[in-house]
Structures are given as C-alpha cells and as structure tokens.
Image: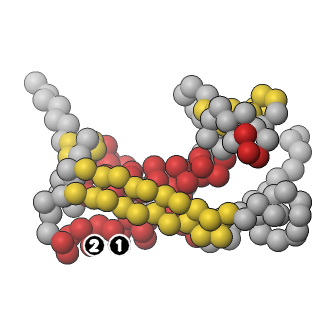
Amino acid sequence: MTVETNVRLNGVDLDAVGSLVGAVQADPAAAQTTWAAQVNWKGGFQSESRVRNFAPVASDEPSTIGGTDTAPNPVEQLLAALGNCLAVGYAANASVAGIAIESLSIGLKGDLNLKTFLGLEAGHAGFDSITAKVNLISDAPREDIEALHAKVRASSPVGHTLGIAIPVSIGPAG
C-alpha cells in the first residue's frame, strides 16, 4: 500500500517545489519556460486579457484619463503583478526555509509622468520609480527574515524584469 503525503507550509506544496527543483537539476533545459497572454480590445480604453484557461481580466483607464473606470489600468496591473510575484517569492522561500508566515501584505506605489503618454514630450513613458513596502509577520528570528527579504529581492522574476532593460518587440502579427 502506498501512502501519499503532501507536506505544506504556508499553503505551499513543498513536495511539488522539491520535484520541480529536482527536475531542473536533472535537466537544466527544463528551467526554460515560455508564458503567454492574449489581450482583446473591447472599445474605448477597455480591454481584457486571457491567460491559460482562466476568466478574462478586465482593464480600463480612470475617467480622468478618458476611460470609464470599470477596471484597474495597465500600470496598476503591473504594480499588482510585481506584488503578486513578491508574495509568491515570500511564500516559496519562507516555506523551503521552514519559516511560518502569520501574515504578509505588500503595498506598491509607482511614480509616472504622463507627458510622454499624452504626446506632450518625447522621453520615458514608464514608471520613474516603484516602491514595494513589505509587511511580513512571523515568529522567525530577525536574521532569518532579513535573509528571506534578500532572497526574494534576488529571485523575483517580475522584479528583475522591471529592474533591467529587456528587449520588447511590438509589431503586427503574422
């Protein structure tokens, strides 16, 4: 008789994480992955994104920018993507290190000048800076929490993507 165990800490399936680590160690090519999304315009400033088989995620602009304010705008979604990625990093790395998380919240803010977006001047259209404030409550020793913060900062895919210039190709399909 086989008994399956599913070891979890902070809601993270440690067996699945361990299996993934083992698979990548055995075959480094398994670490190369491709992710995709499809966005369809719905009119005005409204669009929706689809990822895998999940329900669509709406996007719109605030009425002060000409939208109808029915959903978060793309830059808000970018901040949320960074926060969600950091949350995954904290949950995964804390769990592997044996750190129990009592609560975790991440507040994010970004400074953005609209002049380039509005066509008023040439230059940088994106965020000038992004700040993430992490509130993590745990009984773990302070030095373990500091090491966890450092590990998450060093390994966040979204954080790294935002922190460096990466090639982005935008052009017609086909």
Q: Mark 2 near mark 1, Cβ–Cβ under 8 Å? A: yes
Q: Left or right? Give the position of 150 relative to 102.
A: right
Disc 1 crowd rating (10 Å Cα; few below 14, some 14-19, many 20+) is few
Q: Left or right? Give the position of 98 relative to 121.
A: left
Location of the C terminus by quadrant is top right
SS class of the residue under badge 1? helix
Count of all numbered marks drawn on residues in the image: 2
Q: Quadrant of residue 47?
A: top right
Residue that label 2 marks: 147
SS class of the residue under badge 2? helix
Disc 2 crowd rating (10 Å Cα; few below 14, some 14-19, many 20+) is some
Q: Left or right? Give the position of 6 relative to 27.
A: left
Q: Quadrant of residue 169?
A: bottom right
Q: Left or right? Give the position of 49 relative to 44.
A: left
Q: Percent from the top left, x then y, of residue 37?
A: 65, 39
* Residue 132 to residue 6: above or below: below
Residue that label 1 marks: 150
Q: Percent from the top left, x then y, of residue 9?
A: 20, 46
Q: Amino acid under label 2?
A: Ala
Location of the N terminus by quadrant is top left
Q: Amino acid under label 1?
A: Ala
Q: Residue furthest left?
A: 1
Whether residue 94 is visible, yes or no, is yes
State how far apart marks 2 and 1 are (Cα): 5 Å
Q: Could you tell me which residue is drawn at 82 percent across and 71 percent down?
A: 123
Mark carried by residue 24: none
Q: Could you tell me which residue is drawn at 18 percent across and 72 percent down?
A: 142
Who is closer to the viewer here, 37 or 100? Answer: 100
Q: Could you tell me which residue is drawn at 78 percent across and 28 percent down?
A: 42
Q: Quadrant of residue 3?
A: top left
* Residue 122 to residue 56: above or below: below
Who is closer to the viewer here, 4 or 96? Answer: 96
